[in-house]
Image: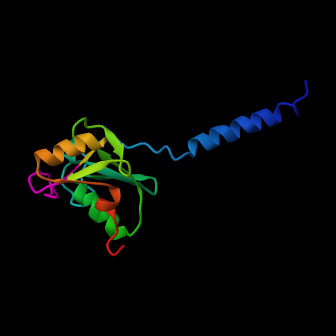
C-alpha cells in the first residue's frame, strides 16, 4: 500500500482541525457559586449583573459590569468579553450587547449597568428604569478616546 497518497489528505485534515481550534469562537466560562469578582473580590451572587473577559488563557469574572468596565479601561486594551443578558441570564458577546445605565438599577457595586442581547429588550428596560440604551463603545470606550 502506498502511503504517499495518504499524507496530503491526512495533513489537510490536521490543518483543518488546528484551524478550527484557533477560530475566534471563544466561549464564556460558567459562573460557579464560589466565584469571586476579579476586581472587587466580592462573591458573584447574582448572575444577571455578571461579565467576564478572556485574557491570556484565563477568565476574569466580575460581579458587576462596572468592575469589568474599570478593569478594561485600566488595562488600556480591548479583550474578548462576555456579559450576561439581564432577562435570559445567557451569555452574550460584550461587543454585540446593548446596555442600559440608570441610577434606578441596583447592581452589586452600584454601577447601574445591565446588558441585553437585543435592542428591543434594552429599550424596554431603559423605559422601565428611566435609563439610556448604550452600545459597547459607549460603555467600554477607553478614556480620552
Q: Which residues are magenta?
A: 101-114
From the top left corner, tell me how far across and down residue 5 is, in percent: 87, 31
Q: Is residue 112 magenta?
A: yes
Q: Residue sitting at 41 percent across and 62 percent down?
A: 78
Quarter in which the C terminus is drawn: bottom left
Of 31 and 95, the residue lying toward us: 95
Residue farthest toward the top in the current orientation of the protein: 1
* The furthest residue to the bottom: 144
Q: Indicate left or right for 88 with 12 as reference.
A: left
Residue 32 visible in the current orientation: no
Residue 20 seen in the current view: yes
Of residues 64 and 1, the one drawn nearer to the viewer in this rendering: 64
Say which quarter of the image contains residue 120.
Answer: top left
Q: What secondary structure is the magenta-colored segment mainly? A: loop
145 vs 137: above or below: below
Q: Quadrant of residue 38?
A: bottom left
- Tell me residue 132's x, y (percent): 19, 54
136 left or right of 41 in image: right
Residue 70 placed where, x, y %?
27, 65
- Report the residue at 17% width, 44% height from top: 125
User: What is the quadrant of the N terminus in the image?
Assistant: top right
Q: Position of residue 87 (x, y in %)?
A: 22, 37
Q: Is residue 107 left or right of residue 53?
A: left
Residue in the picture at 57% in, 46% down: 22
Amino acid at each position: 500500500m502506498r502511503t504517499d497518497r495518504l499524507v496530503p489528505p491526512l495533513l489537510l485534515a490536521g490543518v483543518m482541525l488546528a484551524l478550527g481550534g484557533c477560530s475566534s469562537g471563544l466561549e464564556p466560562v460558567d459562573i460557579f457559586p464560589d466565584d469571586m469578582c476579579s476586581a472587587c473580590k466580592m462573591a458573584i451572587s447574582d448572575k444577571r449583573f455578571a461579565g467576564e473577559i478572556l485574557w491570556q488563557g484565563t477568565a476574569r469574572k466580575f460581579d458587576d459590569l462596572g468592575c469589568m468596565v474599570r478593569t478594561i479601561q485600566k488595562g488600556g486594551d480591548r479583550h474578548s468579553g462576555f456579559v450576561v443578558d439581564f432577562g435570559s441570564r445567557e451569555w452574550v458577546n460584550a461587543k454585540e450587547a446593548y446596555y442600559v445605565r440608570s441610577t434606578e438599577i441596583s447592581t452589586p457595586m452600584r454601577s447601574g449597568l445591565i446588558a441585553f442581547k437585543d435592542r428591543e429588550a434594552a429599550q424596554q428596560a431603559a423605559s422601565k428604569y428611566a435609563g439610556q440604551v448604550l452600545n459597547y463603545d459607549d460603555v467600554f470606550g477607553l478614556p480620552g478616546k
